[in-house]
Amino acid sequence: MRLRKVAVCCGLVSVSWLSCAQTAPGTAQPLPGAPAVALAAVAENADLPSAPEPNNQQAQTAGQNQQGQTQQNQPSPGNAPSLGDLGFTPQQTQANAQLQAMLNKRTEMLKIHQRLGLITALPMAATVITGPMVKAKGKNGQTITEPSNANLDFHAALGGATAGLYFATAYYAVFAPKVPGSKRRGAIRLHRALAFIHGPGMIATPILGAMAFKQEQAGEKVHGIASAHGAVAWVTVAAYGAAIVSVSWPIKF
């Protein structure tokens, strides 16, 4: 009986060993007491569920929170000073259409004044150059040669054109709108000061010239105050030329 029991035990051990040898390596073996569903999942290599992914709204909320934290960490710049902080009143910062129109008119009139001033210089120089042509030649006790009528007329025409252009030029300077509170400085002051020389000269020169013309027409030699006609004309031209150079150098036509 004992031998039979030993043979039966050996047979059982052999069968168990053969069944273990025939099992593929890496195959999960059922553990005693494990649930059937778990064992089936392991046997079929089922994937475990992954972690839930955040939706778009959660991602946007997280990005906004991160951006807000970044902006809070950055130093905020100081407030820029306003025009009121700099001392300007609201009236001063508002556009003044009336003042702008006045400035535009003044600029345009002064430009015309400058152009006419340069144009006036041409007949003025011609009038002075032709001055000796209208003088009587000869000394006292000698035969006096009177200037021709053509020379007298040409000189008078140049003088009249000069006077007309001169006073037109002065008009655009005198009647240009004035900017309240503005002060003249530098070359502008010199330009205006010279006007007190060539202005009266341009009034006196035609008057003295008319007196000299009458004396010439009467066959007389120019005498008296009319003889100062040439000297006054030269002083006027010199002052006028200096006034042009003071504000227009280099001269551009």
Image (tube, helix red, strand yellow):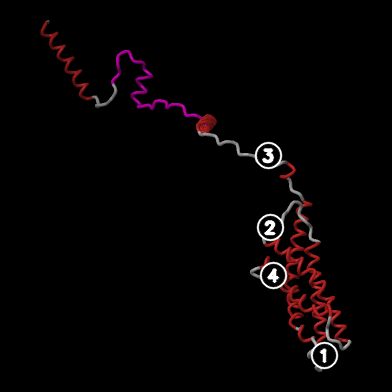
Residue with the mark numbered 4: 242
Local SS, label 4: helix
- For the C terminus, the quadrant is bottom right
The answer for how far apart the CA atoms under marks 3 and 1 are is: 77 Å
Residue with the mark numbered 1: 146
Q: Residue at x 79, y 52 (%)?
A: 98
- Say which of marks 4 and 3 sits in front: 4
Local SS, label 3: loop
Which residue type carries mark 1?
Glu
Res 84 label: 3
Tell which circle, 3 or 1, labels the residue nearer the N-terminal end.
3
Q: Is residue 89 magenta?
A: no
The answer for how far apart the CA atoms under marks 1 and 2 are is: 49 Å
Q: Which residue ends up furthest to the front in the rendered image?
A: 141
Which residue type carries mark 3?
Gly
Which residue type carries mark 2?
Arg
Q: Answer yes or no: do the residues labelled 4 and 2 have beta carbons within 8 Å?
A: no
Tell which circle, 4 or 1, labels the residue nearer the N-terminal end.
1
Q: Is residue 51 magenta?
A: yes
* Nearest to the observer: residue 216 or residue 110: 216
Tell which circle, 2 or 3, labels the residue nearer the N-terminal end.
3
Tell which circle, 4 or 2, labels the residue nearer the N-terminal end.
2
Q: Residue at x 73, y 67 (%)?
A: 114
Corner quadrant of residue 107: bottom right
Q: Which residue ends up furthest to the top in the rendered image?
A: 1
Q: Residue at x 72, y 54 (%)?
A: 183
Which residue type carries mark 4?
Ala
Residue with the mark numbered 2: 185
Q: Answer yes or no: do the residues labelled 3 and 1 have beta carbons within 8 Å?
A: no
Q: Which range of residues does the magenta coloring cover?
A: 29-55
- For the N terminus, the quadrant is top left
Callout 3 crowding tier (Cα within 10 Å): few <14, some 14–19, many ≥20? few
